[in-house]
């Protein structure tokens, strides 16, 4: 059976260019970048070259890039960094959107144990943080605001630049989880006022197990681990040079083709929704204007999202009911409930996430399969 992959928000296949760079690095640059001999110096050189390339893609300086094992580690390190920064400055209040990824939300209990106060700021019915409500929530002792750039479940884009400028004016750190955004929308950390940003290589055509924490040069980065001098002692351990080089190649490729890819997934999105326009009891979750078009979250009255996903899978179509990190959870999506859906409606949704590699023919097959499966379930 031919497969149609429409779950790019969960992970992406590694691109040919990234795979080629990764393989070349494994074969030709196998030295430890901390070694002083020629093999080590060669590995260190291409490591720093990759750091510069990644920094350029997001408008940062190479000295502000720290390599991690992925998005979750980068999220955690950013949260700890903001908390430590606040404590040093006598500020112990952190604001977090209540629709964040669990890698951010699940840090809240730890923060509270450390004596910080966390405000979970509600998003609106589209999953978007309100700038006016953020202003109301900010206090004299607020040290950090956390808002993801693109919501990984519904595609809603936060007003990042506005939030960044508000935080900058008030001397507050702004951390944005950019895992679902990097390589898909334009990011410029300096222009947007982002103090810290997390990235994950496998979300834009790079390999799994490698990520980035960007932290503004003025911010003292907190340690998650302790060990050697790698990554300026802030992330010790021998760097995954092949993974880093492959991630740099994938990020460069995706950012250089942003406009073309966005136009293509926008066209595919419109075709899908047009094909499904007569499905009774269907609705779209997310912001109709401020969205990354490659993530489409659909609900169907009287239909189990899990059953629909499984029927599509039987037809070789790969979609999801939400974040892949929570597939074992029986709870409804916290993002959808944060947007105001009750548990039953939240369980009636699927997420279709596309890339520039999908075709119109695939969209037509997905559409027909959804219509058939919805009728069968009902």
Image (cartoon, rainbow, N blue to C red):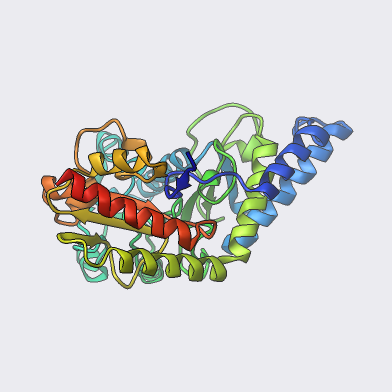
Residue 177 visible in the picture: yes
Instruction: Please indicate whether residue 308 sits to the left or right of residue 72 in the image.
Output: left
- Pinpoint residue 21: horizontal percent, then vertical percent: 73, 44
Residue under the point 29% across and 44% down:
321
| Residue nearest the observer in this picture, 34 or 319 | 319
- Pinpoint residue 187: horizontal percent, then vertical percent: 51, 64
| Residue nearest the observer in this picture, 336 or 268 | 268
| Residue nearest the observer in this picture, 187 or 40 | 187
Classify 30 as above or below 252. above
Instruction: Please indicate whether residue 173 sits to the left or right of residue 44 in the image.
Output: left
Residue under the point 73% across and 47% down:
48
Classify 335 as above or below 137. above
- Pinpoint residue 303: horizontal percent, then vertical percent: 17, 47
Residue under the point 41% across and 70% down:
161
| Residue nearest the observer in this picture, 249 or 141 | 249
Dividing the picture into quadrants, the one containing residue 45 is: top right
- Pinpoint residue 55: horizontal percent, then vertical percent: 62, 57
Classify 223 as above or below 156. above
């Amino acid at each position: 059976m031919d497969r149609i992959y429409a779950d790019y928000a969960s992970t992406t296949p590694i691109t040919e260019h990234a795979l080629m760079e990764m393989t070349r690095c494994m074969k030709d640059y196998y030295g430890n970048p901390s070694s002083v001999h020629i093999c080590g110096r060669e590995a260190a050189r291409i490591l720093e070259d990759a750091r510069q390339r990644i920094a350029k893609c997001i408008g940062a300086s190479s000295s502000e890039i720290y390599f991690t094992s992925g998005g979750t580690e980068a999220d955690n390190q950013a949260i700890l960094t903001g908390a430590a920064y606040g404590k040093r400055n006598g500020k112990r209040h952190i604001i977090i959107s209540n629709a964040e990824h669990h890698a951010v939300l699940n840090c809240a209990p730890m923060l509270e144990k450390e004596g910080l106060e966390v405000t979970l700021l509600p998003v609106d019915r589209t999953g978007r943080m309100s700038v006016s409500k953020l202003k109301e929530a900010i206090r004299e002792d607020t040290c950090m605001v956390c808002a993801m750039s693109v919501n990984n479940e519904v595609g809603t884009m936060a007003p990042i630049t506005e939030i960044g400028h508000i935080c900058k004016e008030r001397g507050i750190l702004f951390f944005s989880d950019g895992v679902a955004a990097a390589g898909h929308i334009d990011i410029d950390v300096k222009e947007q006022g982002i103090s810290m940003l997390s990235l994950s290589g496998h979300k834009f055509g790079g390999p799994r197990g490698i990520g980035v924490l960007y932290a503004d040069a003025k911010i003292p980065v907190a340690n998650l681990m302790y060990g050697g001098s790698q990554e300026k002692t802030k992330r010790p351990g021998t760097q995954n040079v092949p993974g880093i080089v492959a991630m740099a190649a994938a990020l460069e490729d995706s950012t250089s083709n942003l406009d073309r890819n966005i136009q293509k997934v926008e066209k595919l999105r419109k075709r899908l929704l047009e094909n499904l326009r007569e499905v009774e009891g269907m609705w779209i979750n997310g912001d109709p204007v401020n969205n990354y078009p490659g993530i489409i979250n659909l609900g169907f009255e009287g239909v189990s999202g899990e059953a629909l996903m499984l029927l599509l899978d039987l037809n070789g179509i790969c979609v999801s009911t939400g974040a892949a990190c929570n597939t074992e959870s029986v709870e409804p999506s916290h993002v959808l409930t944060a947007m105001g859906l009750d548990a039953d409606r939240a369980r009636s949704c699927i997420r279709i996430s596309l890339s520039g590699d999908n075709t119109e023919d695939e969209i037509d097959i997905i559409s027909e399969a959804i219509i058939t499966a919805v009728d069968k379930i009902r």
